[in-house]
Amino acid sequence: MADDGHYALELRALRKSFGKTEIIRGVDLAVRAGERVAIIGPNGAGKSTLFNLISGRFAPTSGEVLLHGTRVEGKKPFEINRMGLSRSFQITNIFPKLSVFENLRCGVLWSMGYRYSFWRFLSRLDDANDRAQQLMEMIKLDKKRDVLAVNLTYAEQRALEIGITIAGGASVILLDEPTAGMSVSETTRFIHLIKEVTEGRTLLTVEHDMGVVFGLADRIAVVVYGEVLAFDTPDAVRANARVQEAYLGSAVADAQAGGH
């Protein structure tokens, strides 16, 4: 884990209410550059709302979101993306009628300086094509180069989405339940893929599979009723009696029994 002495992402006294219902209740969180953090908690704890606040889909009721020291709360999602944060979603978000290669090339164009220039022939953009090829090899889909995304397996589609997520060169990556719906063998391979493609980047992931959490995260943030109950290493979270009582319980025992 890289740590150059500053925080890649900070949440300060973050709150979000919908009407009279407060969903996020004063969250403070500081994630170091290059760190992998898993956010866990029961359904309705506020995990997805937290991701929406970080990525700009929601504006906070109060509090601050800082990306590499710069406040970003209230900015539009595309503005935050251009500042170095990229997010995947629970539902696979790809271009189904484009090939694997075309999906990835779409992802790299803006970051490489190609704006909305309709007179350019994409096939002639050697640097963008080379970068898309590199990404395709990184996510292990180079043999599916010309396959339409709609015809990929579910796990391959999720891999493609991660490729698109990192295509713009973002330094902070948010993955929302990346292994949901996968088999055990697919999940194992996907953990290795996530580790490889996020090397040197800061990763936040929402995940329910405790085997994935303990196998991937440097630290774990436990969110319960819109508050951070604990933020510590996997071993410390395993041993935290308050976390056990509030959330983990048998899930930790199951993960330990499975060797994770």
Image (tube, grey):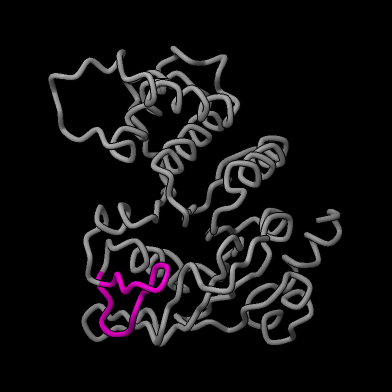
Closest to the observer, 28 or 92: 28
Quarter of the figure with residue 231: bottom right
Q: Residue 134's x, y, as percent?
A: 52, 26
- Whether residue 80 sits left or right of residue 252 in the image: it is left
214 left or right, relative to 39: right
User: On the rendered structure, is 59 left or right of 193?
Assistant: left
Residue 213, x across and y down, in percent: 67, 59
Q: Is 52 colored magenta in this rendering?
A: no
| Image location of residue 109, percent across then percent down | 31, 32
Name the residue at 28% across, 77% down.
Answer: 60
Residue at the image point whose x is 45% and y is 37% from the top: 161
* Image: 10 above or below 128: below
Looking at this view, is 258 or 114 the one in front? 114
**Residue 8, above or below 23:** above
Q: What is the tally of numbered marks visible in this picture?
A: 0
Q: Is 64 covered by the magenta stretch?
A: yes
Front-lying residue, 63 or 259 = 63
Residue in the picture at 22% in, 15% down? 121
Decide if residue 33 is on the left or right side of residue 258: left
Using the image, determine if residue 86 lies above or below residue 157.
below
Q: Which residues are magenta?
A: 59-73
Rendered residue at 29%/83% (across/down): 21
State the quadrant of the N terminus.
bottom right
Q: Position of residue 190 (x, y in %)?
A: 64, 40
Which quadrant would the C terminus be assigned to in this image? Answer: bottom right
